[in-house]
Image: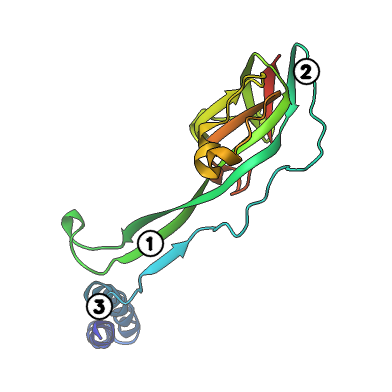
Amino acid sequence: MARIVLTVGGYVLGNLLLPGIGGALGGAVGAYVGGIVDQQLFSDTPDQTVYGARLQDLRVQSSSYGSVIPLLYGKGRLASNIIWMRGFDEEVRTETQTVGGGGKGGSGGGGQTTTNVTYHYYCDLAVGLCAGPIQAVPRVFADGNAFDPAHVGEMRVHAGDEAQMPDPLIQAVESPDRTPAYRGLAYVVMERLYITPYGNRLPQLSFEVEA
């Protein structure tokens, strides 16, 4: 409404001051000022909600029956085979931002509110490495790069000796009588592995192992 009124008023005033071209200039100025007034008064820009990518299915890096268990002497870098996975946990994060609000100190109406909804995913899994026992796992790699320790809540290495006990997380999920100890197999359990930095998929994990 203000835009129409100020456009007409600017045209009339401009034509009185400078016949001809003054009307066009006055109308343009009036339209510009009126548009700003309308935006501040009526906030005609609708709020928006932007949704991020969401996981539809979990793509597993490698999990197969009958795979050969490697024998390692000394030190080597080994690929992993998933022997157990709990699934994934979805975490929804919401961030709201207002753009274009008027007034000092951020007060005043007329701003557009944009809500960004992003989805973050975590999973728990166990990956088999090689025949045990082993001494240590000094380094971990994800998709060929050094793995960021901040991307996992906790990582436990099971050396693979004959006295090895079942992992407590797997026991808690599967029940004690259904949880193997995987004696003779060195394996790693990763709790709350953050997979969103890897495109919402399990990265290709490899481990530097000392036997």
Query: Measuring 58% from the left and 32% from the top, which residue is drawn there?
Result: 189
Picture coordinates of residue 173, whole percent (x, y): 52, 43
Q: Amino acid at mark 1?
A: Thr
Q: Amino acid at mark 3?
A: Phe
**Circle 3: element type:** helix
Q: Which residue is mark 2?
A: 72
Picture coordinates of residue 75, whole percent (x, y): 73, 14
Is 157 rendered above or below residue 172? above
Q: Amino acid at mark 2?
A: Leu
**Residue 210's quadrant in the figure?**
top right
Left or right: where 172 falls relative to 100: right
Is 180 rendered above or below residue 70? below
Outermost residue to the front:
177
Task: State whether residue 22 appears in this view.
Answer: yes
Q: Give the crowd class for mark 3: few <14, some 14-19, many >=20 residues within 10 Å.
A: few
| C-alpha distance separating marks 2 and 1 | 52 Å
| C-alpha distance separating marks 3 and 2 | 72 Å
Single out the mark in the foreground, 3 or 2. Answer: 2
| C-alpha distance separating marks 3 and 1 | 20 Å
Nearer the observer, 5 or 23? 5
Picture coordinates of residue 2, whole percent (x, y): 24, 83
Nearer the observer, 58 or 65? 65
**Residue 43's quadrant in the figure?**
bottom left
Picture coordinates of residue 116, whole percent (x, y): 41, 59
Which of the labelled discs sits on residue 115, or is there none? 1
Q: Which residue is mark 3?
A: 42
Q: Earlier in the sequence, mark 2 or mark 1?
A: 2
Single out the mark in the foreground, 3 or 1. Answer: 1
Q: Earlier in the sequence, mark 3 or mark 2?
A: 3
